[in-house]
Image (tube, rainbow, N blue to C red):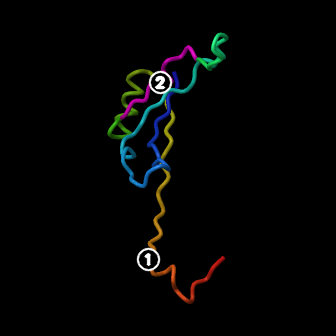
Amino acid sequence: MNVRIYKPAKTAMQSGRAKTHEWQMQFDESAAKFVEPLMGWVGQKDTTQQLHLSFDSKEAAIAYAEKQGYRYRIIEPKERKVIPKSYADNFRHDKVTH
């Protein structure tokens, strides 16, 4: 079974960085999706898609995957680039606009 280990990004709906400090393990799709004929909903027989495991560190997630015999791939988080700005810079007279 294949899993991916990653650190989730900040959601676009909030400015805080809560829930971005833990590492997540998510199972890759192993069964094809199908359209349920009665209601037309999309279904899948693989219930591991609903499962997300959280770990305090990347090493803990790797150790769990190896103990369970899962093949894993690690998606490293992108570093956040912070450009310090001042509110007063919006009103500078020598400001260069693009």
Relative vertical location of residue 95 with respect to residue 54 in this rendering, above or below: below
- Which residue type carries mark 1? Ser
* Figure quadrant of residue 86: bottom left
Query: What residue sits right under mark 2 in the picture?
Result: 50
Question: Observer-nearest residue: 58 or 31?
Answer: 31
Relative vertical location of residue 58 with respect to residue 53 in this rendering, above or below: below
Q: Assess disc 1: are there few (<14), some (14-19) or many (≥20) residues with their C-alpha within 10 Å of its C-alpha.
A: few
Residue drawn at the location 44% of the way across and 43% of the way down: 7
Direction from residue 35 to residue 13 in the image, left or right: left
Can you tell which mark lies on residue 63? none
Circle 1: element type? loop
Q: Earlier in the sequence, mark 1 or mark 2?
A: 2
Residue 11 shown in magenta: no
Residue drawn at the location 58% of the way across and 17% of the way down: 44
Quarter of the image where the C terminus is located = bottom right
Relative vertical location of residue 47 with respect to residue 62 in this rendering, above or below: above
* Figure quadrant of residue 55: top left
In magenta, the rendered stretch is 44-54
How many marks the image carries: the answer is 2
Direction from residue 85 to residue 34 in the image, left or right: right
Residue 78 at x, y percent in the picture: 50, 52
Query: What residue sits right under mark 1 in the picture?
Result: 86
- Which residue type carries mark 2? Gln
Badges 1 and 2: C-beta atoms under 8 Å apart? Answer: no
Residue 51 at x, y percent in the picture: 44, 25
Residue drawn at the location 52% of the way across and 25% of the way down: 2
Q: CA distance from mark 1 to mark 2?
A: 43 Å
Residue 51 shown in magenta: yes
Q: Assess disc 2: are there few (<14), some (14-19) or many (≥20) residues with their C-alpha within 10 Å of its C-alpha.
A: few
